[in-house]
């Protein structure tokens, strides 16, 4: 196992688990693994604290509605969450998945009552969202997977003093190749639908985007491991797919929960030749090399060669 996925110290049981990291780093796989346990419920993305831009966070809109101690404000918040946030992400992105889940699975009057019974804070709205999911899954420990919340780990760990963060790390070259393939097949938002018609420009945009996000993620990784040594675990995607049992057992000790065999009962969901097959796609750790062109290879080597070697990657 890499030194990145290091053995954590003995832990008390977490009260919340957050999965973060640069997109295409295995955060969805980690969410599915944890959600398969009998104790942890890890919901899908909500972008409550922020997206690519902080102002895209749902809580920024909530602040505009007024004092949450006012029942009329609660009504405006619920209407916004159910009719706008869960309905349309806008031209530049799709709606975050967990708000769609909320609208389909939790009656708005039930969610409204959760907010009325809370301390009426921004944290309370976030907490109500996660607890609604956990209760329907019959789980005790709440959690969520929003890669962009990597920027807000201070807030998450302040809100949940017994919380844990799992940071998924992956080679930026693999992220770039994975994202390029995804945008070619399913471009998603309007900008990428347009860029798909100009392949060289799409590749250039994704190369720059991956570089900026991975560099930021690396800075956050170094800082957060120093600041939260017992509450912040870095897991390399490459280690996870190569030796899932060992890595998942390590993660369970970090959270303070028992390892369970169903956590390893996974199906490959990423685009590629192995999609739909049971188990873990170990070839995903190196398959990107076949699709990485010389320009991108030179670009990432120039930007990250030294950092990649320090993280155990072949640069």
Image: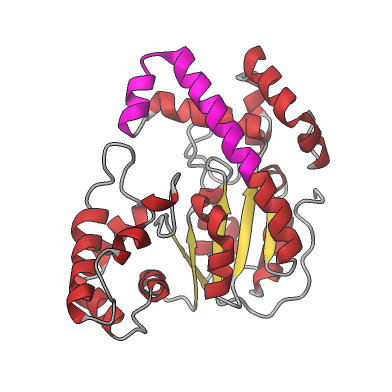
Q: From the viewer's perspective, is residue 191 above or below residue 163? A: above
Magenta residue check for 100: no
Residue 159, percent across and down?
A: 52, 74
Answer whether residue 76 is visible to the viewer in this image. Answer: yes
Q: State the scheme by which the image is colored.
A: secondary structure
Q: In this view, does 267 lie to the left or right of 196?
A: right
Question: Against 14, is 33 above or below?
Answer: above
Q: Residue at x 45, y 44 (%)?
A: 52
Quarter holding residue 288: top right
Q: Which residue is drawn at 61% across and 32% down?
A: 211
Image x and y of residue 143, in percent: 49, 67
Identify which residue, 266 or 46, lies in the foreground: 46
- Magenta residues span 189-216
Residue 207: x percent and y percent? 56, 25
Identify the image quadrant of the C terminus.
Answer: top right
Image position of 146 (left or right of 1): left
Describe residue 154's horizontal placement relative to residue 231 as left or right: left
């Amino acid at each position: 196992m890499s030194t990145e996925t290091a053995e954590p110290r003995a832990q008390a049981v977490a009260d919340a688990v957050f999965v973060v990291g640069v997109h295409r780093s295995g955060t969805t796989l980690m969410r599915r693994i944890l959600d398969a346990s009998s104790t942890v419920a890890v919901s899908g993305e909500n972008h409550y604290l922020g997206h690519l831009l902080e102002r895209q966070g749902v809580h920024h809109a909530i602040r505009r509605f007024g004092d949450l101690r006012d029942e009329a404000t609660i009504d405006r918040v619920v209407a916004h969450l159910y009719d706008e946030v869960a309905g349309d992400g806008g031209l530049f992105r799709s709606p975050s998945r967990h708000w769609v889940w909320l609208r389909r699975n939790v009656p708005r009057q039930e969610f409204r009552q959760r907010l009325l019974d809370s301390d009426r804070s921004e944290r309370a709205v976030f907490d109500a969202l996660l607890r609604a999911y956990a209760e329907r899954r019959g789980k005790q420990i709440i959690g969520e997977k929003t890669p962009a919340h990597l920027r807000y780990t201070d807030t998450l760990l302040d809100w949940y003093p017994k919380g844990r963060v799992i940071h998924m790390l992956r080679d930026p070259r693999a992220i770039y190749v994975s994202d390029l393939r995804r945008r070619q097949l399913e471009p998603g938002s309007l900008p990428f639908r347009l860029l798909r018609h100009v392949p060289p420009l799409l590749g250039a945009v994704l190369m720059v985007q991956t570089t900026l996000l991975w560099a930021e993620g690396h800075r956050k990784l170094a800082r957060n491991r120093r600041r939260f040594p017992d509450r912040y675990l870095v897991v390399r995607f490459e280690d996870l797919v190569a030796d899932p049992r060992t890595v998942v057992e390590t993660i369970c000790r970090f959270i303070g929960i028992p390892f369970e065999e169903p956590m390893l009962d996974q199906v490959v969901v990423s685009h590629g030749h192995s999609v739909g097959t049971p188990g873990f796609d170990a070839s995903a750790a190196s398959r990107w090399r076949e699709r990485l062109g010389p320009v991108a290879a030179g670009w990432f080597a120039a930007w990250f060669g030294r950092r990649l070697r320090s993280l155990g990657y072949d640069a």
